[in-house]
Amino acid sequence: MSNRIYTGVWTDWSLGRVAGTTITLSARDGGLLLAFIAIFVTVIAARLWRSLTFVCHQVLASGGKHDGLHHQRQFILRNIPAPVPATWLFLQQAWHWRGRADRPLLRTVPWAVCGFLYAVLLGLAAVFSSKVSESATPFRLLEAAAAAADCGMFVPEGRDALQQKNAYDNSLAAVYSRQCYGDPDDHDKDVSPAASCGTLPVPSIRWTNASVECPFADEVCMGKSFRMETGMVDSHTHLGINEREQNRVQYWRETDCAPLVSQRGFSRFLNGTEARELGWDDDVLIKYFYGGVGAQNYTHIYNTYGESTQIGYSTWVISSDPSRNASLWRPIEALALDRRDLTLLLIAPNSIVHLQPNDDPVFGAHIPVDLPDGTTVYRADRYASPVACADRHRICNPNNGVCTAPQGAADLVRNARAPEVGLNAAQVAAVDRIGFFVASSTFHQLIWTRTQSYLRAQELVAELLQLPLPSDQWQIEMGSLFAENLAKLQHQMAEYVTGPSIAVAGAVNRAWEASEAMPADVRAAHEDMCRRQRTRDARGTLNFSVLGLAALLGLGSLFVAFSYALEPAAQLLQRATGLGVHKARRWERDENLQVMRMLFEAKDAGVWRGSTDSFPTTESKDYFEWDGDALEQHSRYTTLVRENYDKS
């Protein structure tokens, strides 16, 4: 079984072609992309800071005389490329200019606050940029390349392989349903999901129950029937077949279970010759008559010695498909239902005794037994309690609202292919895949590998003492089986791509290779499903929305380009229109290299050119000394600086 995740670009059709386009990366590659995104966001933030300081500088730039604090503030706005050092300089301004300038706090602290807030926002943006992957779909696509050899419908080879695989699948479904479906009597409530519930397309398939009239003949029914019914199970949403809306199908299932009477001709003790032929005394064996099995004219024989052999619950189960004349079990007329799959269970308590009386029709116990210590316990009312269940299924085409009639599993796929249902090739392939599971989805298939352990009542047994059970325990048991069946359906759908859940002898039926009679488009759809199984199991991979990445990188790149073009474009416009020329000149002259040029010129150090360029240079390759301490002694320094500001 392979659960490798596909890495690359794919589309989650839940979100549509545009929003659903996703790139899945390994943990290493995803980490590198997240690091790049964080750096890119930092670059955007830095360029935004540059643009903001440019605008602020230009707004504040004006001709005339200004105090030193103004010129320092302009210099900071022009030359400090990051908010944190700018904030620190503004705070120092507020301290050092106290008493030496008008309103120094009001003119500096707001700038420091703005710089600090911007730095905080920058940090948050860098941190939350790593969350960009969370905007993508939570689903992954199972690796097609790794699963190619196993993709298809797995058929175990021989009884041993069949039993081994069914035993594993049934145990897996039981554990999963217990963790993710909750208690059967609380199945309509939200449950706290276990970690394993986050791997399949949905944690559980929701279902409802109701008490209805018994579907069987009145003479065999023992009260009301318990009906369990799913809603419409979507092949994409619930089963994970990643397809466009027009390629999806819906599946519906209903199971009616009813306890049966075991008297009045439906069972009898064996006596005389009949008992002797089987090697037992009179009134030891009980025959049950709910239909012949094979060449026998009875259904099952129960040995009443089970009541005294110190053993716990046991279950016998058999099923019948009414569409197959060769079914092993032939139900009696009272149980015969048209177009339904039948399962018969016989639940025997054997030596189990109850601590309290119980009114449940299957687990009922009212026969008192006094133990040596004076405790009174209660034996079951019946040696074996029969329950019959009838299943029917339906396939619907959501494109036109047409559904098959509710029916047994055997004819489901054939009737779904009928022209009036109107399925396309992709839908037919999905129906084949669903039908492969449904064909063996009776309660019989869940019970035969664990005839005792499936019972929820067994969990409340210590030694042979049964703790108190509710009067609807039999419904809890049936609901548990129904939930397990849905859990098994979920896992079986994933197996089409991943291969069998356990390594046993068998063959993978690849429909696109096995049947030449199948239309080419249906064969292609079967093969295409190998690359269309969704899962929530990330296995360390990271998802990124291609739309989100494109928006971030595209808009971010445009803004970065705009920020670089803003300054020269503004200066060009200012010079062309004559508006704000002094502002453009102040932006040029306040730049670090221009200030350095003026200092050198003040000392007659070199002949400089480019007083309005970003990079002033000397006219020639002159060498000269530089002594900044002597600058203040030079007669031209104060004059040149003053002239520079006067020109602005």
Image (cartoon, rainbow, N blue to C red):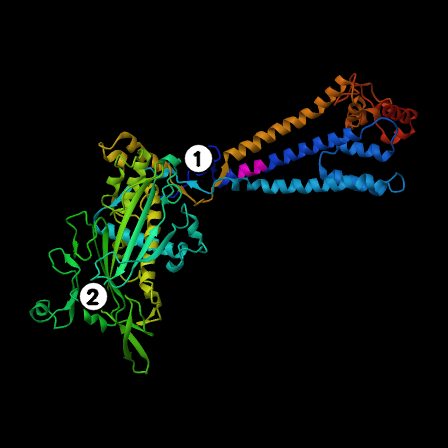
- At label 1, counting other C-alpha atoms closer than 10 Å, the crowd grade (few under 14, some 14-19, many 20 or more) is many
Relative horizontal placement of residue 560, taking residue 333 as reference (left or right): right
**Residue 326 drawn above or below residue 269:** above
Q: Which of the 4 image quadrants contains residue 257?
A: bottom left
Name the image quarter holding the N terminus.
Answer: top left
Q: Which of the 4 image quadrants contains residue 249?
A: top left
**Residue 521 drawn above or below residue 574:** below
Give the residue at mark 2: 262
Q: Nearer the viewer, mark 1 or mark 2?
A: 2
Give the residue at mark 1: 11
Residue type at numbered disc 2: Ser
Q: Secondary structure at mark 2?
A: loop
Q: Secondary structure at mark 1?
A: strand
Residue nearest the observer in this picture, 533 or 167: 533
Q: Residue at x 22, y 65 (%)?
A: 261
Residue 342: horizontal and vertical position, in percent? 23, 54
Name the image quarter holding the C terminus.
Answer: top right
Q: Which of the 4 image quadrants contains residue 550?
A: top right
Asked whether the residues under the numbered discs 1 and 2 touch, taking CB atoms below 8 Å apart as contact, a structural biologist would say: no
Residue 445: horizontal and vertical position, in percent? 26, 53
What secondary structure prevails in the magenta region?
A: helix
In magenta stretch: residue 33: yes
For the image, the number of numbered tags is 2
Residue 76: horizontal and vertical position, in percent? 78, 34
Q: In this view, which residue lies farthest toward the left? A: 273
Q: Residue at x 8, y 71 (%)?
A: 272
